[in-house]
Image (cartoon, rainbow, N blue to C red):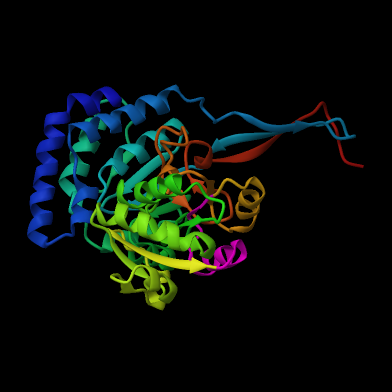
């Protein structure tokens, strides 16, 4: 599969150019166009991700636990494929390759339905993968993008064991409302970074800028910066200068605007907004408790960070913030299957059952109990 992607690079670039041209004509935002764009570096990253998945242990058949109760029967909890997985996604054509290889590695069949923005790119990637010799129908791409196909797919509970939507909140809400099978999803990526009173301020600036600007149109980009009151007057002018150098628009609470007098006021709506753009809201808080409370109220349970040199404070943050990923002194941009060593990811789940956080190979398996004996009957 990786070789096929590399060999088809010219065709992928040609197909992607059609999608980019159509996106510009439709007036897609800069962030959306960036998500859509393929270049030689991104195509190589796609292939490298497949290479990494190929080297990872196959989870199917792994014995998760085993024991022998007093009856003498031998019980093994063993990983098995989920079955057939439907994946509905928007914009990012690399999802076609990531989803295909992860599902294939775990023995799952997959039906892919990409968005209209990336239809030429998705078809080209699927055609490349089809040359790699996978069994017929193991990886299928729905070749059209009409909205009816979403509702049809969501109603195929007789054939699909799981459906995973990746895209905007509207798409995910639609799939959840229609699906007749289990859904794994996240609605928003409202990620926070809390700069504690005991933070290394230079580190906090670097992590803030990287979390916000390294790639702003993705779900693990920073959307709200929380700053402890004790260091706000020293820290805010420095971080604001670094963010302004990257063309980030800042919106602040009343106390923040007393220090950064030239920024816009943040509204109640801002605290719950996933900008997916070079916009950042800032709030001054009095304590760790206030930061945790704000995150748990306004966040999306995706990825939240504390920057501090105080290990006790950090451990409290990690325990008390109710998110799939909680980081200490790490950029939010590391909430990613590739960065976790999964090779690629099928998505990031903010659900609490079965899968949470970046989903790799293990999260695409279920389990069964395999029981062996020598004629035991129950008395």
Q: Position of residue 373 (x, y in %)?
A: 79, 28
Q: Quadrant of residue 291?
A: bottom right
Q: Quadrant of residue 251?
A: bottom left
| Residue 221 point in image, percent of width and height | 37, 53
> Could you say which is closer to the camera, residue 30 or residue 20?
30
Expressed as whole percent of the image width and height from the top left, the position of residue 87 reads: 37, 49
Q: Examine the rendering and report whether any part of residue 143 can be seen.
A: no
Quadrant, the N terminus: top left
Toward which corner of the image does residue 141 lie, by quadrant?
Answer: top left
Q: Is residue 20 magenta?
A: no
Q: Residue at x 47, y 39 (%)?
A: 360
Instruction: Work out which residue is located at the far right of the displayed protein and give it.
Output: 379
How many numbered discs? 0
- Horizontal relation, residue 168 to residue 123: left or right: right
Which is nearer the eye, 218 or 81? 218
- Work out whether 213 lies above or below 250: above
Foreground pick, 67 / 171:
171
Above or below for 151 versus 327? below
Can residue 34 be spotted in the picture? yes
Decide which of 201, 250 is in the foreground and name it. Answer: 201
Residue 229 position in % (x across, y down): 52, 65
Q: Residue at x 43, y 64 (%)?
A: 176
Q: Which residues are magenta?
A: 286-307
Residue at horizontal 49 percent and vertical 41 percent from the top: 364
Q: Quadrant of the C terminus?
A: top right
Any magenta on residue 294? yes
| Residue 296 in the image: above or below residue 107 | below
């Amino acid at each position: 599969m990786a070789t096929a992607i590399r060999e088809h690079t010219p065709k992928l670039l040609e197909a992607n150019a059609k999608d980019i041209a159509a996106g510009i004509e439709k007036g897609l935002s800069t962030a959306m166009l960036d998500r859509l764009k393929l270049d030689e570096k991104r195509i190589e990253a796609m292939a490298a991700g497949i290479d990494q998945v190929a080297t990872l242990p196959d989870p199917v058949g792994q014995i998760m636990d085993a024991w022998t109760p007093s009856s003498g029967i031998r019980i093994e909890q063993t990983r098995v494929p989920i079955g057939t997985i439907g994946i509905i996604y928007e914009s990012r054509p690399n999802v076609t390759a990531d989803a295909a290889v992860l599902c294939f590695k775990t023995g799952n069949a997959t039906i892919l339905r990409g968005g209209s923005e990336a239809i030429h790119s998705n078809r080209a990637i699927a055609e490349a993968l089809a040359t790699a010799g996978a069994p017929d129908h193991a990886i299928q791409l729905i070749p059209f993008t009409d909205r009816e196909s979403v509702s049809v797919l969501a109603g195929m509970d007789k054939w699909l064991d799981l459906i995973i939507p990746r895209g905007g909140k509207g798409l995910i809400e639609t799939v959840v409302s229609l699906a007749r099978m289990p859904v794994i999803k996240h609605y928003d990526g409202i990620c926070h970074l809390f700069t504690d009173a005991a933070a290394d301020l230079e580190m906090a600036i670097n992590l803030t800028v990287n979390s916000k600007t390294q790639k702003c149109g993705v779900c693990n980009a920073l959307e709200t910066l929380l700053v402890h009151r004790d260091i706000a007057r020293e820290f805010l002018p420095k971080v604001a200068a670094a963010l302004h150098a990257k063309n980030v628009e800042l919106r602040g609470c009343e106390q923040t605007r007393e220090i950064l007098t030239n920024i816009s006021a943040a509204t109640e709506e801002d605290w719950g907004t996933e900008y997916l753009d070079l916009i950042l809201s800032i709030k001054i808080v009095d304590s760790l408790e206030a930061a945790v409370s704000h995150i748990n109220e306004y966040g999306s349970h995706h990825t939240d960070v504390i920057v501090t040199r105080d290990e006790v404070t950090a451990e409290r943050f990690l325990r008390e913030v109710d998110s799939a990923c909680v980081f200490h002194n790490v950029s939010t941009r590391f909430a990613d299957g590739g960065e976790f060593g999964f090779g690629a990811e099928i998505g990031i789940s903010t659900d609490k059952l079965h899968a949470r956080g970046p989903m790799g190979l293990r999260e695409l398996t279920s389990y069964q109990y395999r029981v062996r004996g020598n004629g035991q009957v129950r008395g």
